[in-house]
């Protein structure tokens, strides 16, 4: 059976080249006679895999020496709690920007661990825009400012990096990290679940500045303390070894295909193709304000919602899968992560045009 075009918001599609290499190496990695899944995480073979993955990611993102890179478990959801536990000192306030469902989850998790100041919110217009920074009500002495760079559910993305002065800037980049170049040095901490642009589920990346290590008051338990994982080189306990390996293959693929600047140009082209079609049609609509539209996750509705189930059934018959929108908002959603080829987006647009012509 030919591969389908997978528009899932996560776990998302992976580069075919990466999957083929992983399949080729499944039983025998580089003449070791064993799968990466079977390797000791403290053996020289896996350590070489982890070290190359880190080196390649540092090269891709230009991560400065001032920042540690951690390969952890628990996804972004665990980071919702680890961040306030590690960065809050005593009763310091943390500023949060609410742009959608994932920002709300981060806010709710932090609220039980710190004094949270809701500095701005887009809830007044159903999370269809990014609040302008001029309207943010930031605290005078915040421990950090947190924002969600891309909202997978609502299809809203920051096209800019906030300027918060000397206050550490923290961002959930689970769904757009590695989709464009990034000045990592402007951030105190970046975190991301892997299952969008990075690799398989089970791995979370944390990029954290040296001066933010070991400052949590009270000190977090060992497994929840960044200092523990920095000291152990992400191997305090057994890391998600196979996920690290596959992520490393993705980093290598990105480097071989032009790095993040080239990835951004591909992502712009894909997003423009779909948005231009939607905007030129009376049959489909996207609710997000144009300057804040996500390149990664594009929600859309039909002018006649009664046809949506039929649309999804027909899409699947055309090998266009995982287009159903999140249950909280309904409709459809096309996720265009790095590994989605522009041919997949063109196939979706062609199907949308045919469906509109038939049903409109």
Image (cartoon, rainbow, N blue to C red):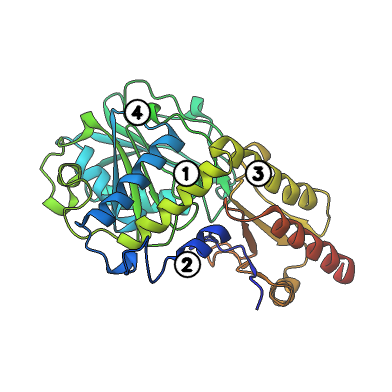
Query: Is label 3 or label 2 in front?
Result: 2
Q: Residue at x 42, y 31 (%)?
A: 62
The alpha-carbon separation of the residues under discs 3 and 2 comes to: 27 Å
Residue 10 placement, left or right of 215: right
In the picture, the disc for residue 24 is 2
The answer to whether marks 4 and 2 mark residues whose Cβ atoms lie closer than 8 Å is: no
Q: Residue 59's x, y, as percent?
A: 42, 35
First in sequence, mark 4 or 3: give its number.
4
Q: Which mark is residue 260?
A: none
Using the image as rendered, state which of residue 227 and residue 260 is in the foreground: 260
- Residue that carries the numbered disc 3 in the rendered image: 266
Residue at numbered disc 4? 64
Helix, strand or loop for disc 3: helix
The residue carrying mark 1 is 177
Q: Nearer the viewer, mark 1 or mark 3?
A: 3
The alpha-carbon separation of the residues under discs 4 and 2 comes to: 34 Å
Residue 162 visible, this orientation: yes
Q: Position of residue 187 (x, y in %)?
A: 37, 31
Mark 4 / mark 2, whichever is N-terminal: 2
| Residue at x 49%, y 55% (from the top left corner) | 196
Distance Cα–Cα, label 4 vs label 3: 26 Å
The residue furthest top is 165
């Amino acid at each position: 059976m030919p591969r389908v075009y997978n528009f899932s918001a996560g776990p998302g599609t992976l580069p075919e080249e990466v999957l083929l290499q992983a399949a080729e190496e499944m039983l025998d990695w580089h003449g070791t006679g064993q799968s990466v899944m079977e390797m000791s995480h403290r053996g020289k073979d896996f350590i070489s895999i982890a070290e190359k993955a880190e080196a390649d990611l540092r090269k891709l993102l230009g991560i400065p020496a001032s920042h540690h890179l951690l390969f952890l478990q628990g996804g972004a959801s665990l980071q919702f709690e680890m961040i306030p536990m590690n960065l809050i000192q005593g009763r310091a306030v943390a500023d949060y920007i609410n742009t959608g469902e994932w920002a709300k989850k981060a806010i709710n998790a932090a609220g039980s661990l710190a004094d949270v100041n809701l500095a701005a919110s887009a809830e007044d217009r159903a999370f269809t825009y990014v609040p302008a920074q001029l309207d943010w009500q930031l605290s005078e002495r915040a421990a950090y400012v947190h924002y969600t760079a891309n909202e997978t559910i609502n299809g809203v993305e920051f096209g800019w990096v906030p300027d918060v002065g000397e206050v550490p800037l923290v961002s959930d980049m689970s769904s757009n990290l590695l989709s464009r170049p990034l000045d990592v040095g402007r951030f105190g901490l970046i975190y991301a679940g892997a299952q969008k642009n990075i690799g398989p589920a089970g791995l979370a990346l944390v990029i954290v500045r040296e001066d933010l290590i070991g400052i949590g008051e009270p000190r977090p338990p060992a497994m929840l303390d960044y200092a523990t994982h920095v000291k152990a080189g992400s191997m305090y306990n057994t890391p998600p070894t196979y996920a690290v390996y596959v992520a490393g293959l993705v980093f290598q693929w990105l480097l071989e295909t032009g790095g993040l600047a080239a990835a951004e140009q591909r992502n712009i082209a894909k997003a423009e193709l779909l948005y231009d079609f939607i905007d030129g049609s009376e049959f489909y609509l996207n609710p997000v304000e144009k300057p804040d539209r996500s390149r990664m996750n594009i929600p859309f509705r039909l002018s006649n919602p009664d046809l949506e189930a039929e649309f999804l059934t027909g899409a699947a018959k055309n090998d266009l899968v995982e287009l159903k929108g999140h249950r909280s908002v309904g409709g459809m959603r096309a996720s265009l992560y790095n590994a989605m080829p522009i041919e997949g987006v063109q196939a979706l647009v062609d199907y949308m045009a045919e469906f509109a012509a038939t049903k409109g």
